[in-house]
């Protein structure tokens, strides 16, 4: 059963990603990590020579890939595609250890469609890898609980992967380290020999230290350790806001949005519905014969994959995508977080009262890991995409695996499968319609992405004609008005332009976005623009309303360094001339190209 389920999950993910994985260019989020990696290859050190808002793990990974395959954007997309396949395969293998294979397949395919169908980040972005390493760590931890005293190899591997998570992204590493470091030793200790719990904690710590110490040693050798700790964990974290604002961000976000309140209400209703048909001790699905289970897995996989293929070949779905899309992106986040919290409280209470069975221990570990990861991920945004995995598929599989075997229970399970297929169709349709939408840049329909841009860095990537014309024009503006040895600047988050134009940045930060860039970095770069004016400045329009929204969300309503920077940018006039005005495809945002007067 496990192999059949793994085959179905991998096949579905490949078919889902195949039409679009290299047929878009997310200008405002594309190539960040690759450009950081390229700067490392050029001899610069993050934190010391340029501001970097996350730990260096992924930038170093991209540096290694670039050194082998060149500075092509498609390399990052291929890395993300492979990481996504591994992520959902590992997620399935984890769930299939504690739930029936069929419901594990349903849950993972649902999660894959929802996550991959989101358009907020390219495949080569930061989040897929930052979810993959924690899920690998959680899987290793489940094997560690197979032995009374804890499997030492599995424990050390879980610790190592938790350390890799911390070297990849702060929230991922903190959530993984906290959940595994507290829950696994406690479970092992409560089996009757407390020193086994102490030993488990030590082994986890030893594994964790290896990647963390290696990263710190590399940074220290290049004189960047202090700056790293400040930028990634101390001062740099101020870009997210105060501790109080982090803890309440999700509540405030839901309270302030009508759509999110509806999604939260739907998540609560779904939780209550599944609770109403909950049955302890298993369901009829656990008693299915192996042959029946195998046929169900293959049939569901074939239907779900067929839905994706059908959507790809339709001009449009027979229903609107906007409202279903809002619900699809947000309700599962709240369902997974709420459900994992309920399960954590339930099995945590049982843990305090008696020794748990092996399966209950697994539920406690999974619910703790899922809830902590989802909650910490919400520090970045109330509906951060990374909240989805592993919380949603874990809770979904748990609920469907523990439904009563009466008529009402079977009806709920059948209706859920139909709903999952509807979600698959909606997610596929949304992704084909617009594979990337973030920070005022939106890519058009994948079916129109037929042009390969005339840049060596974009070989293997197809975009719409509008995107191609925009890139050709803005890069030509930069190259025509600056020498190769002259720094240029772009704002607020298009470092791919440096890569395509072969120009160095004039600023310390390469990305100026309010939830990753602290105010003093903003102000220092504003001063750099005035002290050493770059040859060319490219700006993507940032309205007063957008600046104010960022200040409300991440600065408690106080004036931010972003405001200072944009004040300087809006007053470039005396030393610059406006050389070109462009409009972004689909979003119709104004892009200005300013050239220094002496050019």
Image (cartoon, rainbow, N blue to C red):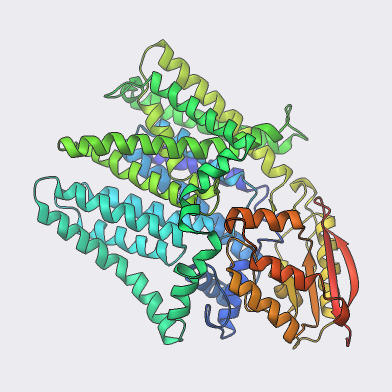
Residue 568 percent location from the top left of the image: 76, 73
On screen, residue 318 versus residue 75, left or right, reads right
Tell me if I can see residue 1 in this picture: no
Tell me if I can see residue 63 in this picture: yes
Residue 423 percent location from the top left of the image: 59, 32
Farthest residue to the left: give it.
Answer: 193
Residue 106 percent location from the top left of the image: 47, 33
Q: Relative to 78, say whether 526 is above or below.
A: below
Residue drawn at x 62%, y 45% is 118
Q: Relative to 7, say whether 516 is above or below.
A: below
Residue 219 picture quarter? bottom left
- Placement of the C terminus among the 4 image quadrants: bottom right
On screen, residue 136 versus residue 259, left or right, reads left
Residue in front for this viewpoint, 203 or 300: 203
On screen, residue 391 versus residue 549, left or right, reads left
Residue drawn at x 42%, y 46% is 91
- Placement of the N terminus among the 4 image quadrants: top left
Residue drawn at x 45%, y 21% is 273
């Amino acid at each position: 059963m496990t192999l059949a389920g793994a085959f179905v999950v991998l096949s579905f993910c490949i078919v889902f990603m195949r039409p679009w994985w290299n047929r878009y260019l997310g200008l405002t989020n594309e190539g960040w990590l690759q450009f950081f990696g390229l700067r490392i290859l050029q001899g610069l050190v993050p934190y010391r020579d340029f501001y970097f808002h996350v730990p260096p793990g992924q930038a170093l990974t991209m540096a290694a890939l670039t050194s082998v395959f060149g500075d092509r954007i498609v390399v990052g997309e291929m890395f993300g595609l492979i990481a996504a396949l591994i992520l959902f395969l590992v997620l399935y293998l984890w769930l299939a250890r504690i739930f029936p294979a069929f419901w594990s397949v349903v849950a993972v395919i649902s999660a894959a469609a929802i996550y991959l169908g989101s358009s907020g980040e390219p495949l080569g972005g930061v989040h897929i890898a930052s979810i993959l390493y924690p899920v690998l760590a959680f899987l290793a931890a489940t094997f560690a609980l197979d032995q009374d005293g804890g499997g030492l190899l599995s424990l050390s591997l879980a610790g190592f992967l938790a350390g890799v998570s911390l070297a990849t992204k702060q929230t991922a590493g903190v959530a993984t380290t906290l959940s595994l470091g507290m829950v696994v030793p406690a479970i092992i200790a409560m089996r009757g020999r407390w020193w086994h719990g102490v030993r488990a904690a030590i082994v986890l710590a030893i594994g964790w230290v290896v990647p963390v110490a290696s990263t710190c040693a590399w940074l220290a050798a290049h004189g960047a350790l202090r700056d790293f700790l400040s930028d990634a964990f101390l001062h740099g974290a101020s870009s997210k806001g105060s501790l109080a604002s982090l803890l309440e961000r999700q509540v405030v976000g839901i309270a302030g949005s009508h759509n999110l309140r509806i999604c939260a209400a739907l998540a609560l209703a779904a939780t209550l519905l599944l609770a109403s048909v909950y049955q302890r001790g298993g369901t009829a699905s656990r008693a299915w014969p192996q042959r029946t289970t195998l046929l169900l897995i293959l049939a569901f996989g074939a239907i779900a994959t067929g839905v994706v293929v059908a959507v790809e070949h339709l001009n449009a779905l027979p229903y609107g995508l906007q409202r279903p899309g809002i619900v699809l992106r947000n309700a599962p986040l709240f369902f997974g977080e709420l459900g994992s919290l309920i399960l954590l409280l339930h099995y945590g209470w049982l843990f305090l009262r008696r020794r748990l069975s092996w399966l209950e221990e697994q539920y406690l570990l999974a619910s703790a890991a899922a809830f902590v990861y989802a909650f910490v991920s919400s520090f970045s945004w109330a509906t951060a995409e990374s909240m989805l995995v592993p919380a949603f598929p874990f809770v979904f599989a748990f609920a469907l695996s523990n439904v009563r075997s009466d008529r009402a229970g079977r009806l709920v399970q059948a209706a859920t499968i139909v709903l999952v297929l509807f979600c698959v169709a909606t997610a596929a349709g949304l992704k084909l319609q617009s594979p990337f939408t973030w920070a005022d840049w939106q890519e058009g329909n994948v079916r129109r992405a037929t042009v390969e841009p005339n840049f060596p860095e974009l070989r293997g990537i197809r975009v719409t004609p509008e995107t191609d014309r925009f890139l050709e024009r803005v890069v030509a503006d930069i190259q025509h008005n600056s020498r190769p040895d002259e720094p240029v600047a772009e704002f607020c988050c298009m470092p791919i332009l440096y890569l395509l134009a072969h120009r160095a940045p004039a600023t310390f930060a390469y990305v100026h976005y309010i939830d990753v860039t602290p105010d003093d970095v903003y102000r220092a770069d504003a001063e750099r623009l005035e002290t050493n004016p770059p040859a060319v400045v490219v700006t993507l329009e940032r309205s007063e309303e957008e600046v104010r929204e960022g200040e409300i969300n991440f600065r408690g309503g106080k004036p931010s360094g972003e405001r200072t920077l944009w004040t300087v940018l809006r007053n470039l006039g005396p030393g610059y001339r406006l050389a070109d005005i462009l409009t972004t495809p689909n979003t119709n945002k104004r892009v200005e190209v300013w050239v220094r007067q002496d050019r």
